[in-house]
Image (cartoon, rainbow, N blue to C red):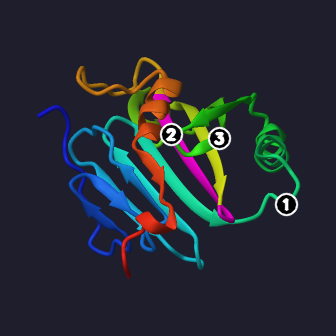
Amino acid sequence: MLGERATGSSVMRGKLENNVYTSPLGHFRVRIPWLSSNSTVRDETSVADTVIVTIADELCREFIVSQRPGFLGAQSLAFWVDTHIVEELKRLNFTVQSKPLMTRNGPAMMLRYRAAAAAPCSRTAEVDGKKVVTKLDADVGWYVYHRDGRFYRLIYFVGIGPDAPSLWYVNREPVDEVLAQFAEGFKILDSKEQPAP
């Protein structure tokens, strides 16, 4: 089998069936990407109408899907993303590339940047007889959507560099391609597609 089925946590609020996660209120669903062994899927619903799903595996990769309430008002999605996300990332000294996309879920904004020592994994090396734990650098990509008073974000973090783990049958990079494949399996559901409570 080319990849492993993801295992959901025992306290999952949404539904994981046939490698597809559906959010607790049925606002979105996402196909779980090919993962290495010991992968995990967990979700959090700490605030009303807010869902965060985190998918991680041993290849130093983390896929995040989030849903949060919010309104654009008269602003465009590009302006909102630039004001509320890109400006904050720039304040943190990230060099952010952004571009608009048209997706199966409508308009989206794509962001990409590199982050030093921000990978979802670490490596242990021996230096002068002592074990030293270091974080790998990360390549990060985002898709941001807005529909029906909700913002949706798909985020992909991957550890990069010569020490990053890999498997020949699982794509880790380039970030924009892996994120685009992940986004193909993401669907914002219309009210008629949402499962009955």
Q: Quadrant of the N terminus?
A: top left
Foreground tag (3 vs 2): 3
Q: Residue at x 20, y 36 (%)?
A: 3
Is 184 on the left-hand or right-hand side of 142?
left
* Quadrant in the rendering for residue 49: bottom right
Among the two numbered marks 2 and 1 on one chain, the one whose residue lies closer to the N terminus = 1
For label 2, count other residues whose C-alpha is less than 10 Å away and answer few (under 14), some (14-19) or many (20+): many
Using the image, determine if residue 18 lies above or below residue 37.
Answer: below
Q: Dot 3 lies on which element?
A: strand
Three-letter amino acid code of the residue under disc 1: Gly
Q: Dot 2 lies on which element?
A: strand
* Quadrant in the rendering for residue 168: top left
Using the image, determine if residue 195 lies above or below residue 150.
Answer: below
Foreground tag (2 vs 1): 1
Q: Which residue is mark 3?
A: 108
As measured in the structure, the alpha-carbon distance from the residue carrying label 3 to the one carrying label 2 is: 15 Å
Is label 3 in contact with label 1 (beta carbons under 8 Å)? Answer: no
Using the image, determine if residue 11 lies above or below residue 58.
Answer: below
Main SS, magenta region, reads strand
The magenta segment is 148-159
Among the two numbered marks 3 and 2 on one chain, the one whose residue lies closer to the N terminus = 3
Q: Which residue is mark 1?
A: 73
Is 92 on the left-hand or right-hand side of 60?
right
Three-letter amino acid code of the residue under disc 2: Tyr
Q: Quadrant of the C terminus?
A: bottom left
Is label 2 in contact with label 1 (beta carbons under 8 Å)? Answer: no
**Front position in the image: 194 or 63:** 194
Q: Residue at x 55, y 58 (%)?
A: 66
Query: Residue 56: where, in percent of width, then height?
Result: 37, 47
For label 3, count other residues whose C-alpha is less than 10 Å away and answer few (under 14), some (14-19) or many (20+): many
Task: Answer whether residue 158 is magenta in the image.
Answer: yes
- Whether residue 76 is visible here, answered yes or no, is yes
